[in-house]
Image (cartoon, rainbow, N blue to C red):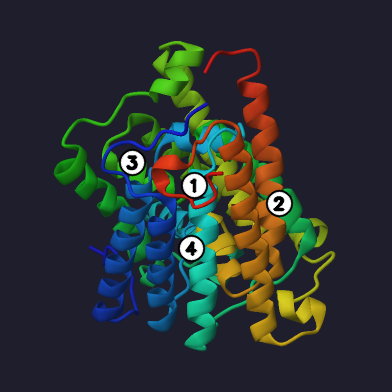
Amino acid sequence: MTELVRTGTPLSVLLLGLITGVAFGFVIFKVGASRYDKIVKMLLIKDFTVLKFMMTAVMVASVGIFLTDSVIYIAPLQLMRLIVGSLIFGVGFALLGACPGTVLVAFGEGKKDAWYGVLGGLLGAVVFAHVYPSLIDILITPLDYGKMTIHGLFGTSYALGVVFLLIVFGGSILIINKLTASKGGTQSQTGAKNVS
Amino acid sequence: MRQSQIKGEWPWHIAGVILGLVVVFAFITGHPVGTATTYERVAGHVLQFFFPKYVANTVHYFKEAAPVAEWQVMFVLGMLLSGIIARYFVTRGKGEEIPAMWAGSFGDNKRKRYLQALVGGFLLLFGSRLAGGCTSGLFISGGSQLAVAALVFAGGMFASGIVTAKILYRGRNL
């Protein structure tokens, strides 16, 4: 019998991954991001809970990563693959009503359709691996701008890049709160300050 | 349209701060959060059991997503586990067969919903792998490190996601 799982990773690191995953997934569950209706209502522009949740997380994490100097890897700005990939992703996002991570939480919760979502995801990954070699020249290598960051793009310091992200995301949240509040005080129970 | 915050759910700002701290913890301990690659690793692992030659000859599996267990695979299993914990300790019930909102608009044909979920999952992961990440890997990890790729990805996924959702629910009562 061959070994079931090949791993060159120490047990402590594997355990760390598991614990981090449980914490990450539990927050997703607790905010309701593993719910079909939350995701689809966001895409129908009716409920911004998950969007504001994600933007808040990125804001906090960007500051934390900056302060602890723990940048690990900047995804390259390969425009072709990013645009085509994200557009395909969005269609799947709306059909399934979950993203690759949240569908796993939903699966754990026992939601039956999430099972099919995960199965479809595994198939999608297999098909991608199969066609990948033929996509390299048309979708992966063209329009590659390398490891581009916000501060790299504007030619400013890392600190200013973080400030820029905080202003854009924070501003977006404030605008969303203003717009949804004026439609009928939707934020009252989550304690938004801008109820005028 | 009132936004629903179900009893016991955390408000977005508190949950957002906690998730952000979890992400910082992951980075400090040496790993960016991410999910999509694991689908390929797991699928590759299963395939390898049945078709070892095929997997060995599919360059992509070994170059970018070798079928091995590592931090991210455990992270993904952790997410699954969090759902199981939620089910047995928080919701304490069987998961719904199909989403109530979906049933309210499209009827209670389960097969139709499962087929839609299957196709959705397929496109979701195909798109993720093509883009080079998903909501967690590209948007959250990428955005937190100020990668411009994160913003492009977010723009694309919401653009096509909104159009698809609007088409699906056009003329249907919510």
Where disc 1 sits, the SS reads helix
Q: Please name the residue shown 71% across and 51% down the image.
A: B155
The residue where tag 2 is placed is: B155
Q: CA distance from mark 1 to mark 4?
A: 10 Å
Label 4 resides on the chain identified as: A
The residue where tag 3 is placed is: A107
**Which mark, by number, is residue A50?**
1
**Which mark, by number, is residue A57?**
4
**Relative to B27, is B82 above or below?**
above
Amino acid type at mark 1 = Val
Q: Are marks 1 and 4 in contact (CB under 8 Å)?
A: no
Q: Please name the residue shown 54% across and 55% down the image.
A: B135
Amino acid type at mark 3 = Phe
Amino acid type at mark 4 = Ala
Residue B119: name its quadrant: top right
Where disc 4 sits, the SS reads helix
Q: Are marks 4 and 3 in contact (CB under 8 Å)?
A: no
